[in-house]
Image: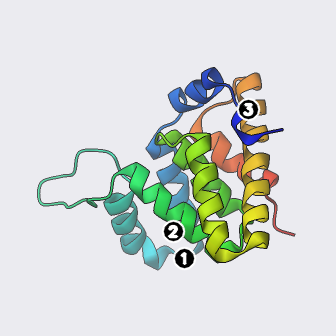
Amino acid sequence: MELVGILTPEELEGLRRGFSPEGMIEPSRQTLVGAFPPIQGYANSFLSYFFSEAKPASGEEISSLSPLERERILITLQVLRMNGNGRFLAIHLYWGLMTGLSVQQIADQLFLIGVYAGLSCYTAAIATFQTLLRHLKQCVASGDVQAPSILAATAQWFAVT
């Protein structure tokens, strides 16, 4: 099935309504810090700087990148780093959709990356995106559209063996 036809506009809108950046940030923080508590300051700093959409506290700085720009960069980085495969690419494909990227825009981005990175990278990235979209469709059908549960589910959808 063509990528653009997997999710309907209504399904994508339902996913976006269930999305909150904090629903992604806090589990990420817990995973990072839980594995190695001494990095708590580092994790808090970069997560707040790049990912938080809350108004910064007095004197606190945030990135000049919009969430959409950030996710375009991270999708590109993950495609190249993971050769188009994996959970972390899927997470940023999902986050990109939630920040306003369309399926078509992401598909175009993956194609352009593939032109430079090679056919195997492109086909793996498209397969990852297609798998993600199919799972997201199932989440909408079951009513499970909250970001933390989708983030947790990616561990099963893209299990590392």
Q: Are marks 1 and 2 in contact (CB under 8 Å)?
A: yes
Between 117 and 75, the one lying in front of the other is: 117
Q: Quadrant for the N terminus, please.
A: top right
Residue 12 position within the rendered picture, expressed as x and y whole percent measured from the top left: 61, 30
**SS under mark 3:** helix
Q: Are there few (<14), some (14-19), or many (20+) residues within 10 Å of tag 1?
A: few
Between 30 and 155, the one lying in front of the other is: 155
Task: Indicate which label's residue lies in the foreground, 3 or 1.
Answer: 3
Residue 58 position within the rendered picture, expressed as x and y whole percent measured from the top left: 12, 54
Residue type marked 1:
Phe
* Mark with earlier residue (2, 3): 3
Residue 153 relative to residue 62: left or right:
right
Q: Marks 2 and 3, Cα distance to the nearest angstrom?
A: 39 Å
- The residue indicated by pointer 1 is 36
Q: Marks 1 and 2, Cα distance to the nearest angstrom?
A: 5 Å
Residue 142 position within the rendered picture, expressed as x and y whole percent measured from the top left: 76, 24
Residue type marked 3:
Gly
**Could you tell me which residue is drawn at 36 percent across and 72 percent down?**
41
**Could you tell me which residue is drawn at 73 percent across and 70 percent down?**
121
Q: State whether residue 7 is above or below residue 67.
A: above
Q: Quadrant for the C terminus, please.
A: bottom right
Q: State whether residue 57 is above or below residue 89.
A: above
- As drawn, the residue found furthest toward the left would be 59
- The residue indicated by pointer 3 is 5
User: Label for residue 33?
Assistant: 2
* Mark with earlier residue (3, 1): 3
What is the quadrant of residue 109 in the picture? Answer: bottom right
Residue type marked 2:
Val
